[in-house]
Image (tube, rainbow, N blue to C red):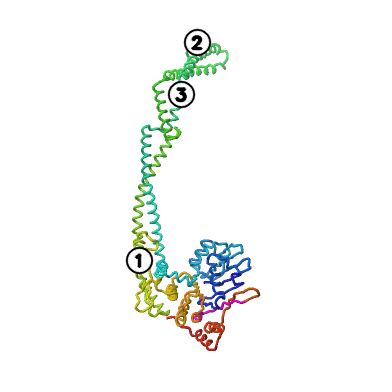
Amino acid sequence: MLRHLSIRNIALIDQLNLEFKPGMTTLTGETGAGKSILIDAIGLILGERANMALLRNGAQSGEVTGEFTINPESQAARLIADKGLEHPDDLPDDQQTLLIRRKLSQDGRSRAWVNDRPATTALLRDLSVFLLDIHGQHQNQKLIHPAHQARVLDQFAHLETQIQQLKKTARQLSKAIEAQRLLKEQEQTRADRIALLTFQLDEIEQINPQPDEFNQLHDQLKKLSRMEQWRETLAQQINALYEDEGNAHDRIGQAVNALGQVADLDPAIEPMLEALDQAQIHVAEVSSSLMDQLSNAELDPAQLEHIQNRLDQLHQLARKHKIAPETLTDHIEALQSERAALLACEQDDQALEEQIKSLTKQYEQQAQEISEKRQKAAKRLQKALAEAIRKLGMPNAEVKISVREDSALKERFAERGINRVQILLSANVGEPPAPIDQVASGGELARLALALKTLTAGDDPIETFIFDEVDTGIGGATADIVGAHLRMLGEKRQVLCVTHVPQVAAHGQHQWRISKRQMGSNTVTSVQPLDKDSRIEELARMLGGRTITNETRAHARQMLEHPTQAE
């Protein structure tokens, strides 16, 4: 509920602080006094586009602050909690404060705060759908659009939760269909790529490179190319160690013999003799091993040719694929992985097909259930709506709400279902019901809108409704009945009603007079809460114009003290 509104330097308003109460409050005053300014100011805190023309002439900045009380369990409370913008207050547990402030500056900038923390106008707009509904003459025009008529019916039928589920299914289905479409578009390209990869892998398989084969062959070739040098080195060392005259093995033997002849003269020579014996044995063993290596180290021209040919194959394959020879096995793994991924896309296509079938069936079931509930709700709503508008000065009105299945909506899996909804009206006896955009006048549209608002208010999360001259074009007994319905709506929600019609104004539980006066060289709009006597004077003015007589005052008192009750 809107609890407080503060306006500074907006249009004709210098400074204004308003305290709002529950129930129905009417705002009256002369034409041009500034009633629309209040609506524009409230629109600013609801996130509407900042019109710098609203800034008071000569002011550097203007500001509007609205204070609301909201239920902690409401959607508005959940939204500000998600944004971390809760207000620390000491209200009862079943209420929470929401403070919205909007500032306009002469430099063209607009800034907003929620609970004294910076916020975007997008957030204000998101909040507004849970806080306050401004219903003016142009809002009545929304009623002629079938999409709006469908939403009204869905609200009456309590279908929003099911529609959200249907939206989720429709979006999943659209996403799956799009994914499948992209797969189909890429199908030929994918098939061509799979064929190329298969050809390349078959060609590689014929050569069959092994892990690290290139490096190993390269090492072998290097060894074979130095084979002759290696053989000569082995032969030289065999001769030096064991074969040539004066070789190491014989000279160690000679040393052993010589030292053995004097070993009895010095005990320290004995361990030396043992070491030399071991050395002679090791030289003999090494020489034997070198001889074995030399006998096996025959140069094999066929093996050398095989290695060179194999290396040539690997080089050619690598050049063909524009890679280094040593990375062939990594390249093969990459080709195999790519082909496997492309082949898996065919399985993805099959999975998508199954998913689309499942989601289509789910969508059809959900949409059909919603359609059946709409059909039933339409019968109840058309009966209730006809009764309501008959009480609003259209005694011969007939209403029909058409709900039909549309194959085009079904084919494109429309997010709100498969129905076209249309409200048909007959205002006069003998005339068949016809679409309201073709037959309803402005006054009839206003009464239809008011009747629908009254019928659906109990299900609307919004707690505050503002009616901006929705009674234009009606008067007398009809206006009295409209006022009674607005007051009845005020028993469920907070209602603010800007009106020029005394029969409507009299139904308000509270009334404010909006006026303007000249202060020096400026014109200022002010708002005055009216007590009973002031209300009688204001209603008399609305009834009688400039000349207020005792008769008009008596009539005004009668209207105020004995308002018509809504049936």
Q: Nearer the viewer, residue 535 or 19?
A: 535
Q: Quadrant of the C terminus?
A: bottom left
Amino acid type at mark 1:
Ser
Answer whether residue 347 is magenta in the image.
Answer: no
* First-in-chain label (1 vs 3): 3
Write down the residue under mark 2.
245
Label 1: how many Cα within 10 Å (few below 14, some 14–19, many 20+): some
Compared to 244, does 382 lie above or below? below
Labels 1 and 2: the sequence-earlier one: 2
Amino acid under disc 3: Lys
Q: Is residue 228 above or below residue 128?
A: above
Please state the horizontal and vertical placement of residue 225, each as a whole percent of the image: 45, 22
Residue of label 3: 223
Q: Is residue 450 left or right of residue 55?
A: left
**Region in magenta:** 505-517
Residue at 63% across, 67% down: 59
211 displayed left or right of 56 = left
Does residue 202 appear to the left or right of 524 in the view shown? left
Q: In this figure, what is the number of numbered marks? A: 3
Q: In front: mark 2 or mark 3?
A: 3
Q: Earlier in the sequence, mark 2 or mark 3?
A: 3
Q: Main secondary structure of the magenta part?
A: strand
Along the line of sight, the residue nearer the viewer: 502 or 380: 502
Identify the residue under disc 1.
371
The local secondary structure at tag 1 comes to helix
Q: Mark 1 to mark 3: distance in Å?
A: 85 Å
In 3D space, how far apart are the residues under numbered discs 1 and 2 (Cα atoms)? Answer: 115 Å
